Image: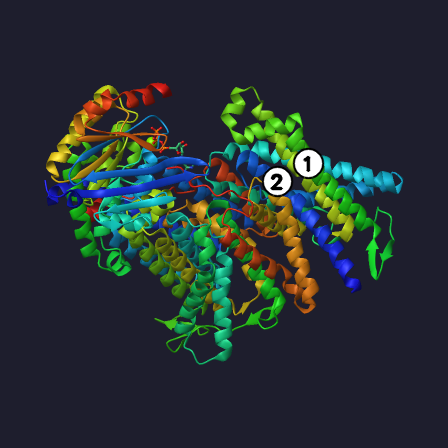
Amino acid sequence: MTSLSNDVLLESRGLTVRFGGLFALNELNIDVRNGEVLGLIGPNGSGKTTFLNVISGVYSASAGKISLGGIDITREKAHNISSYGLSRTFQRSRLCLSLSVFDNIALGAQRTLNNGLWHNVVQRKAFAAEARKIAEEARELLGVFNTALPDKLFDPAISLGMIDRRRVEICRALIGKPKLVLLDEPSAGMTHDETDQVVDEILGIRKSLGGLTIIIVEHEMGLIERVTDRCVVLNYGKKICEGKFRDVAADPVVREAYLGQA
Amino acid sequence: MGMIGQHLLNGLMQGTIYGLVAMGFTIFFGVMNVIKFSHGDVLTLGAFGGLVAVWAANALGLSVPLQFIVALCVAMALTAVVGAGISHFLIMPLRNAPPLNMLLMTMMVGTAIREAIRLFFPNGTNPQRFPELLPAGGFNIGPSFFRTDAIILIIAGAASIGAVYWIINHSKFGLAMRAVAEDTETARVMGINFGRIIPLTFALGSITAGFAGMIYALYYSEINYSMGLLLAVIGFTAAIVGGLGNIWGAIIGGYLFAGLQTFVVAAMPSMSDYKNVFAFVLIIVLITWRPTGLLAERGSERV
Amino acid sequence: MTPTSRTLARGPVWPLFVAVAFAAVALTALVLIENQKLLGAALAITAAVCFCAARFGGVAATEVAASENPWLLRGLLTLASLAVIFVLRDDNFGLLMLATVLIYATICLGLTVQMGYAGLTNFAAAAFAGTGGYTAAMLGQQGGLPDALVLVCGGLVAVFIGSLLILPVLRTRGHYGALTTMAFGVMFNVFLDANDFFGGPQGLKLPGINLFGWDFTNDIHIFGLVLSSYVNYVILTGILTALAMIFVGLLDRSWVGVWFDVVRLDETAASVFGLKIAYWKVLAFTLGNFLAGLMGAVYAKMTGFIAPANFTFGDSLVMVSIVILGGIGNRWGVLPAALIVVLLPEKLQFIQEYRLIFYAVLVIAILTMRPDGLVARRVRKLHTEASA
Ligand SMILES: Nc1ncnc2c1ncn2[C@@H]1O[C@H](COP(=O)(O)OP(=O)(O)OP(=O)(O)O)[C@@H](O)[C@H]1O
Ligand SMILES: [Mg+2]
């Protein structure tokens, strides 16, 4: 490993998000290293989703600083942040259910597509070539899941089951070839077996897409243990612990945070 | 200078009417998240009901004060029944539809009421004279002349605003209503009769329209089939500017709109035909500045 | 795909022929028949046939055939239109009604882009059309500008007036957004009524269209036939409707259409994946207002006279009703919906006086019983583009 500063992809310093009097994030310093899978855990309401929201530009920071690949993105709008190579999934599935799987996945590649009116309405051949390319890539990504999903590319998203919707969301997040992917509870609403399957799939994607950096929020500790390199534990918007999952899980402060909440 | 008192009175009068109408909008929105655009035409219906009641009472030979009471009761009862009926038969079945569908639906209900009055009320296309039931005359303060009936109407209007405010905030019914508004499911679990509260709420909101319709009729001594449309647009505007669901906001919005209109008329008499244009432009500017209303707290959508 | 598997996937073509022929015959009959009883019978038969076609898969088969044979569809529609025009060639009133239906339908295509695609509420479509109409009238008084440019200017001025509203439209959502355009729609009328410069309540007169030297007040003499001068307007509005239809259709089947949908359905997801919400909303608002202004100008020139009463808030409501009635977001739906809303009250004499109440009850019935409209929008499938 080279020097640390080169190695850090995302950096938050003193990051604070307030809703009225509530500190959803409180002076948070988190570094995410290039190529690692960082687990973000903590009790309900501890600010995990808020952290993902603020770095992807959905919420704005009340104080502090975020930089991505050395660029300050604290004040950037969400639609610009994606162009620095960040994409994500959502805790509550956010597919456009009345659109086809293809349309939903294409959204993930939006930055790479030609949005000009002339291109879209008049140069139909060029447009069709783009559509073919996206369809191919989408099939390939969906193929990782080893299911019948690639054949459902033009079905409406609403016809899919919960687990397939999650998969489509993950594809949408990956098709734009991001540097950093945020996964918010990818196993939410799934059975135990399905969760195991998702773990394997994430590991598979990881392998096929080399240097991808991932921040994953999860309540399913088995999943966290298997996929993460490192974990950060939040409680009441503050970082209370950081390190390998084994060490973190053994930490008395973390145990108390989880028990105190239960 | 003598005009100032006149303008003030006029503005207060209109503000009271607008505030009453806006309060209806905000009550419906608070409880069901719907914009009931037919509200203005329910108001018209109330005024016409009052007119028919006056005619009937007159034919029966009742005294003027009795005519007044009969008219008021008929107007309020009619609007209550119609409001509850609209909510039960038309709004409830659509409550899970997209907001646009609901808005369009209530606009069309309003159109149907308006057209029905125009077509089926005797000579309904023309304005109808509304008899004067309140004491005529007035008094001077300095150079300004104050109409007695106007003073009475403003006080009555303000009192009714206060009464509705009290019902919502301090009565048992108001408590149930606010519980439904806060969280329909929880209210239902806690044993609040959802199926009764909703029509009653719409009845209450519509009674304010009936009352406002009577105030309008008594003040201007003339009513017409289409008077509700502009009142609905203005009332909706006032409710929006104040922040939907916020009673105080609606009242303030109503007086604000009337204030803007009156200001244009008073300051630029030559432009008085444009008073609504000015008022709407200002409202559009206001809504651009505070897109969720003047009194709304700013919150970010949860993701 | 191999050619064989492609031919295998195709449905039969004949439903398309039948559907277009039926539409043409029904349309002609509805316009021509004057006798109220006959008309009622014709309406009942049309409704029954449509209902049966929907019930027993005829509509679906037609849709499949149409989407698989776009050029055949366009050719058939052109032929059918010419046939209808030929039959109605000297029925001035009927032709005027047809042109009006087409104008409404095209304005509603613009509304479809705004409300159906990008999710912008617009309760001022009639005001934007009126802006186009008044532009044409004012430019006509100055003279000098060729009419093709006058019509385009109608659209552009509507876009300009719309751009004054863009900030509130972008900043507000839902009911708050509805207020902005509603206030504008009401204001437009109040302003024109009060303003002498634009003719006040009496309105303005304006001359007919003269396009590239061809005066639209002339009858058309062709193959020894005489076609009423109103055929000019039917052809012009027909071409404009067809162009708008094709444009909106291509737009829908492109990234732009997908992004509009995403912006309507989920602004958060849209912006997280890099869509600039404001840009797409402005684009949709602009396209829709241009169509409204353009067709408003054509309407003004066609009727030769405009007044504030032609462009009231009630008319905007009628236009929104057409969009909902047809099935919001389905561009084909606006044609039958515009036909029902514009033609029926004109034809059915007993309705005329009651037309607004008729609209109101019709829309209430549709909203409660068939909230997706006559023809619900289908899920977009870009597989033809993506697998050619
Ligand atoms: N838009 C918002 N407005 C107001 N408060 C919010 C908003 N979003 C989050 N909060 C509050 O911020 C705190 C942190 O919420 P957050 O969703 O980040 O928790 P979380 O760690 O993701 O919890 P969970 O495990 O339940 O998903 C909570 O108290 C929540 O109520
Ligand atoms: Mg969360």
Relative to B282, residue B22 above or below: above
The residue under the point 87% across, 38% down is B60
Specify whether C193 is left or right of A256: right
User: Mark 1 belongs to which subunit?
Assistant: B
Relative to C89, residue A241 above or below: above
Q: Position of residue C24 (x, y in %)?
A: 38, 53
Q: Nearer the viewer, residue B241 or B33?
A: B241
In space, the residues marked 2 and 1 are separated at their CA atoms by: 10 Å
Q: Position of residue C231 (x, y in %)?
A: 42, 66
Can residue B240 be seen in the rendering of this structure?
yes
Q: Quadrant of residue C191?
A: bottom right
Name the residue beneath numbered marker 2: B247
Query: Badge 2: few (under 14), some or many (20 or more) residues near its Cα, within 10 Å?
Result: many
Relative to A231, residue B220 above or below: below
Q: Position of residue A107 (x, y in %)?
A: 26, 45
Q: Secondary structure at mark 2?
A: helix
Q: Position of residue A241 (x, y in %)?
A: 26, 29
Quadrant of the rendering where the N terminus of chain C is positioned: top left
Q: Residue furthest bottom?
A: C144
Q: Nearer the viewer, residue C356 or B40?
A: B40
The residue under the point 22% across, 56% down is A124
- Which of the numbered marks, if any, corresponds to residue B164? 1
Pick whichever of labels 2 and 1 is earlier in the sequence.
1
